[in-house]
Image (cartoon, rainbow, N blue to C red):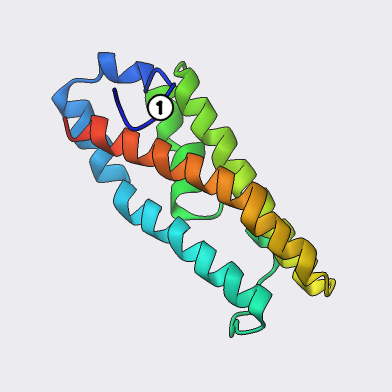
Amino acid sequence: MGLMTGMAGFLGFAKLDAFKKTQIREEIDLMDAIQAHVMWKLKLQDCIDGKSKEKLDPMVICRDDQCTLGKWIHGPAMRHFHEDETFHQLRANHAQFHFVAGSVVQKVQANDHAAAEVLMKGEYQAVSHKVMIELAELNQHLND
């Protein structure tokens, strides 16, 4: 069983040949995407703790098409996986990740640190975990 417990995996991969897998690996480094999303947890926690040196804009953060992964998901990935339900779940989870991250910053900026912390420990942690697992599963399939 793959990393995504209880999920069927990426259906489109049954149809991907070695050339197509190479092409996708050249489009996106999924391990870099995972690392970038891990770094968001640190950025958000610094924001909550008042340690952030960055000016975080929740209206930008909530956009799931601005990061490298999001640009790939909304662009080239759609050509490869437009019929793959699991890909669409990754797309939805990635969008939710950005929405919740933006909400955390919004709560901090409204001086509601307790609500920001609740979001971080609840919804953010859950959706972040889903995205990481889905990306790891996708990366595993590309390297099989």
In-image side of 78 versus 139 (left or right) = right
Res 94 quadrant in image: top right
Q: Residue at x 63, y 43 (%)?
A: 96
Relative to 49, is 120 above or below? above
Most foreground residue, 142 or 107:
107
The spot of residue 60 in percent (x, y) is 66, 61
Most foreground residue, 123 or 14:
123
The N terminus sits in image quarter: top left
Most foreground residue, 13 or 116:
116
Element assignment for label 1: loop
Relative to 60, is 139 above or below? above
The spot of residue 132 in percent (x, y) is 42, 45
The C terminus sits in image quarter: top left
Q: How many marks can you see?
A: 1
Judge whether residue 98 can be spotted in this image: no
In-image side of 89 versus 111 (left or right) = left
Three-letter amino acid code of the residue under disc 1? Thr
Relative to 49, is 106 above or below? above
In-image side of 125 versus 108 (left or right) = left
The spot of residue 84 in percent (x, y) is 44, 18
Give the residue pinned by disc 1: 5
Q: Residue at x 28, y 36 (%)?
A: 24
Judge whether residue 138 can be spotted in this image: yes
The spot of residue 31 in percent (x, y) is 30, 51
Q: Residue at x 38, y 40 (%)?
A: 135
Relative to 131, is 103 above or below? below
